[in-house]
Amino acid sequence: MKNEKTYELVLTALFTAIIVIMAFTPLGYIPLVVINATIIHIPVILGALFLGPKKGAFLGFVFGLTSFINNTFKAATASAFVFSPVLAYNVAGVSGIFKSIYICFVPRILVGVVPYFIYILIRKALKSEQKAGGIVVNALASLILFISVRAFLMRLFPETLSALVCTVIGLVVGIVLMVVLTVSGSKKSSANIALAYAGLAGAFTNTLFVMSGIFILYKDAYANAVGVAGEAVLDVIMGVVTFNGIVEAVVAAIIVAGVGFALTRVKPIYSKPERTMDMGKTVAKI
């Protein structure tokens, strides 16, 4: 028991160090021609899976803290105030402090919570004796890949490829993935699929909560910062969600599935401990 707690403490410290290093160096981004995909949330997602949602929430807080520090002291963009309560005070007064605290910390803390429960949900769906659960999961993965490929191609080749061609290519890739997932369905692949979904969920949680928070809390101020009309803010935000968000989610799915599978050889996915009624000892729920 002590060895397990020590191991988890070491792993928590390791993930924390990785988050800090990624946040303050270019290692937190992967260049993908048209965008730099953020991967700082990946250690938070892995922490949620292997250490549980409580430690995952702590790692998410660390992620938010690094974002607060970066945007407060570097302020590389005009919209940095949305992640910095200090800068937000100059933009929106006292209310801006609380708005930016929410945007900077709450979505990142949720990144350390949501993926764990998504993983459990997907594993249960894929383990179900009914094939409908597996079909739905595989179809959803194929749909996400289709949307991602289409959006990526349209942004990468706006003048070379038409929307129809991008749609067809994305559709073909999505169908291929559906076939591969259906044919290769097994307990091992279900674990990998669940890990991939956890990565998707973590990345989307960050993007959706941050961007929706900006729209609800800072619509006009954000419009002034990025230099667009107030009515165009929704289009800007939807562009970030449908392109950057999807691409980063797919990248997170691939990395979390690969790294997560490797880590399962050393440590199993976190299981919530339960107390037995008769023995009063803590046991792990498998």
Image (cartoon, rainbow, N blue to C red):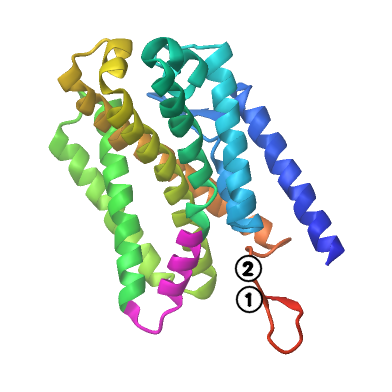
- Please tell me which residue is depicted at 57% across the width and 19% down the height of the picture: 70
Q: Residue 209, located in which quarter of the rendered image?
A: top left
Q: Is residue 240 positioned above or below 113 on the image?
A: above
Foreground of the two, 205 or 81: 81
Question: Distance from label 2 to label 1 (Cα)?
Answer: 6 Å
Count of marks, rendered view: 2
Q: Which residues are magenta?
A: 117-131
- Please tell me which residue is depicted at 59% across the width and 29% down the height of the picture: 65
Q: Is residue 136 positioned above or below 168 on the image?
A: below
Q: Position of residue 172 (x, y in %)?
A: 25, 51
Which mark is drawn over residue 285?
A: 1
Residue 230 shows up from this direction: yes
Q: Earlier in the sequence, mark 2 or mark 1?
A: 2
* Residue 129: in magenta span: yes
- Please tell me which residue is depicted at 63% across the width and 68% down the height of the picture: 271
Q: Which image quadrant: the N terminus?
A: bottom right
Provide the residue designation for mark 2. Answer: 271
Q: Is residue 136 positioned above or below 132 on the image?
A: above
Principal SS element in the magenta part? Answer: helix
- Please tell me which residue is depicted at 31% across the width and 35% down the height of the picture: 212
* Residue 72: in magenta span: no
Residue 32 shows up from this direction: no
Q: Residue 23, located in which quarter of the rendered image?
A: top right
Q: Which image quadrant: the C terminus?
A: bottom right
Q: The disc labelled 1 sits on which kind of residue?
A: Lys
In this image, 25 relative to 38: left or right? right
Give the structural element (helix, strand or loop) at label 2. Answer: loop
Do the residues under discs 2 and 1 have CB atoms within 8 angstroms? Answer: yes
In this image, 161 relative to 40: left or right? left
In this image, 77 relative to 260: left or right? left
